[in-house]
Image (cartoon, rainbow, N blue to C red):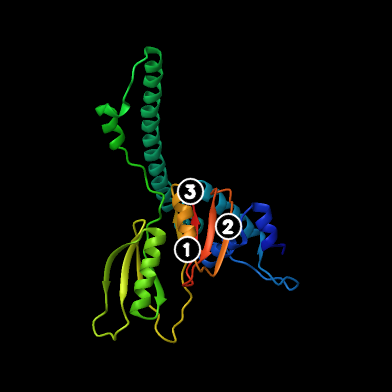
Amino acid sequence: MSLTTISEISNELCISTRTLRYYEQIGLIHSSKKDDYAYRAYDEDTVTRLRQILVLRKLRIPLKQIDVILQSENTAEMIDLFEQNLAEVDDEISTLSTIREIISSFVTRLNKSIHQDIKLNLLDDTDLLEAADALTVASKHPRFSMSFDIAHNDIEMIEVFAFYQKAFGANKIAEFTPPGSDKDNLHIIMKIHDIDVLLHPVHPGDERIQPGGLWAYDNDDDLRKTIDTLSQEAREITMHTWPHWPICAIVTDRYGIEWVLHN
């Protein structure tokens, strides 16, 4: 059986080894071990599967749906998933088409004003403003819920929330202490980019591995601001330029949470 090492497949497909490990962590691919290799390696079937994953990612199919698509033997289920994505693309095309028409109208009218030597205030055009205001552009942000074991006491919990509020602009939805619990058991529910995140304390002797987070940004400024904030006292920071995203960073923050950030 022919095996390809993790570094070889990383170079061949222009994908970071961290991403390969992440795909393996969530069960999308599986690695093998060869007697004379100390590192991960992949057989031909896994390399083929990885190529399929990368194609689907370029089509902007979410990872959770990719997992279903690659494992499902139910054609109807696969059709339904693709139709969901197709509907989202159609909505975006419609929105972008309207945006193009409005901007094109601005350019046309401004060109006329130059030749007629008149001042034109486009923002006084009620019809165009109403058309632009009615536009809805689908958010890039994934929507799911996560739970982090992150702090040892109430003071640390408040500190954690303040940190993520600065980094992500998190909003506090609720805070509570479960009935019958001892002190230092504060729980905080916060919302980041429409995603509900539960922060709750780590119990002594239960130091579990922290889950990671994947966040998408519409502009570089917000992305860099988040990277800069998370990088304060970070345990590890790696920056990448991937085919999928112009900027990507993997930051393991001071609390041990690994955040994958991209635009």
Residue at position x 54%, y 62% in the image: 23
The residue drawn where x is 58% and y is 51% is: 242
| Quarter of the figure with the N terminus | bottom right
- Residue 56 located left or right of residue 110: right
Q: The residue under label 1 is which amino acid type?
A: Leu
Image point (62%, 67%), residue name: 31
Badge 3: few (under 14), some or many (20 or more) residues near its Cα, within 10 Å? few
Q: Can residue 65 be seen? A: no
Circle 2 residue: 239
Task: Kindly identify which residue carries mark 3.
Answer: 220
Of pointers 2 and 3, the one earlier in the residue sequence: 3
| Residue extending farthest top | 116
| Quadrant in which residue 117 is drawn | top left
Q: What amino acid is found at the position of numbered circle 3 in the picture?
A: Asp
The furthest residue to the right? 36
| Left or right, 243 with reference to 146 | right
> Distance between the Cα atoms at labels 2 and 1?
13 Å
Residue 92: where, in percent of width, then height? 39, 39
